[in-house]
Image: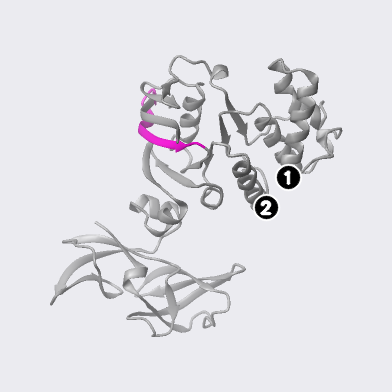
Amino acid sequence: MEALKLVDLHKSYSQTRALDGVSFRVESGEIVAVLGPSGCGKSTLLATIAGLEQPDQGEVFWNGSSLSDLSPHRRGFGLMFQELALFPHMTVYQNIAFGLQMAGMDKPAIRKRVQRMLDLVGLPEFGPRDIHTLSGGEQQRVALARSLAPQPKLLMLDEPLGSTDRTLRERLILDLRIILHRIKQTAIIVTHDQEEAFALADRVVVMNEGKVAQIGTPQDIYRKPASLFVARFLGLDNIISAKSQQVGAQLMAETTIGQFPIDHQVKGKFKLLLRPDKLQLGKAGPCQIKGTVIERSFRGSICQTVIEVNRLRFRFDFPSSTPIPPESDSITLSFDPQQALQVFP
C-alpha cells in the first residue's frame, strides 16, 4: 500500500536548483534510501517532505492526501539527524520520554512506551543511565528509540550513521534494518554512503543535481546502473571508449584493449563498462585481456587489483584466495561479455 508519494517537486535557491522534478513513491513499511553526492538535493528533499521547506512546484501526499496545508508538527513525521542532539543533562529515559511528555501522554503510558523502545533497541536496563556514560553505538540506539517513541507515520533519517566508525556503522546498519522491519516502520534514509544505502534499504533512489537518476532495488542498481553518472558514483570506474562494428552476424565493441561481442544495438561511438567483479584469472572465459599487475590491495574477502592494459588502468575485485601474480608481472584475465560488459550509448 502506497504511503508517501512525491509528485514533480521543484525547489530553487537563487540560481541553484536543489530539486528538479523529483517524483517517487514509498510503500507502507518500506525502507527507501535517497543516495547521492553532496549538493544533489537529498537534504532539501527531506526538509520538503517534513514541511520545513515549501516546494516551488509539486506536491507531497500521504495516504493519498496532500500535505501542502499541513505544518511540520501536524504531519506526524519523525526526524533523526547525524548529530543525534541528545540532551546531555537528561537520563536515557528522560531523553526518550521528552517527546511523549510534550505530546501530553500520561506517565503510566510514557513508562510503558519508553520501556518498549528500550527493549526494541536492545538497551532494556539503560533507562537510568546518563547520556555521557554511553558509547557512540549506545547513543545512536537511544536517538533511534527517541525518534520511534512517538510512533511516527514516517521516520526520516539524515545521514544517521555518518559520525560512527566503520566497524560500529556496519553493526548498526544491520540492527537498524532489523528494528525498522520488525515494527513495519515506513522510513526514508538520506545518505551519501553507497554501502549504507544498499545494506539498509528495500529500494534506493539515486539523485544527481536535483534529479532522480535511478530508482530500484540495491541489487538492480548495482547490477545495471542506468547512466554513466550512476556507474561512476557506485565506484564502477572501468569505463572505456568504444565504437560499434558489425562482424558477420555479431555486433562488436572495438576498444583499445580488444574487440568484444555485445548484445546492445548501438551505432557509432559509446562508452563500455567492464565490471570489476566479473573477471577471472586465466583463459577460461570466451573473452580475454592481457596486462600488467600494478597494485594489489588486500580488503578482507576480496583482493582489489589494479591492472594496466595498453596504458589504461583498471580496478578488479577478486576473491582473496585468487593467486594474483606479483606487481609488475603479466596477467591474463577472461570473462563472459554478457555478464562483464555494459553499454552506455
- Residue drawn 40% across and 30% down? 6
| Left or right position of 35 against 229 | right
Type of the residue with mark 1: Gly
Element carrying mark 2: helix
Q: Which is more toward the observer, 5 or 184?
A: 184
- Residue drawn 62% across and 68% down? 300
**Residue 18 is inside the magenta segment:** yes
Give the quarter of the image for residue 13.
top left
Element carrying mark 1: helix
Q: Name the residue under label 2.
A: 171
- Residue furthest out toward the right: 128
Per the picture, the main secondary structure of the magenta-coloured stretch is strand
Q: What stretch is highlighted in magenta?
A: 12-28
Ranked by sequence position, the earlier of labels 2 and 1 is 1
Residue 43 horizontal/vertical position (percent):
50, 32
- Residue drawn 28% across and 72% down? 256
Image height of 231 relative to 159, above or below = below
Badge 2: residue crowd in 10 Å (few <14, some 14–19, many ≥20): few
Residue 87 showing in the rendered view: no
Q: Residue 137 carries which label?
A: 1
- Do the residues bearing badges 2 and 1 touch, measured as CB atoms within 8 Å? yes
- Residue drawn 86% across and 32% down? 128
Residue 8 horizontal/vertical position (percent):
34, 29
| Left or right position of 249 against 290 | left
| Left or right position of 73 against 121 | left
How far separated are the C-alphas under marks 2 and 1? Answer: 9 Å
Give the quarter of the image for residue 286.
bottom left
Type of the residue with mark 2: Arg
Image height of 60 relative to 277, above or below = above
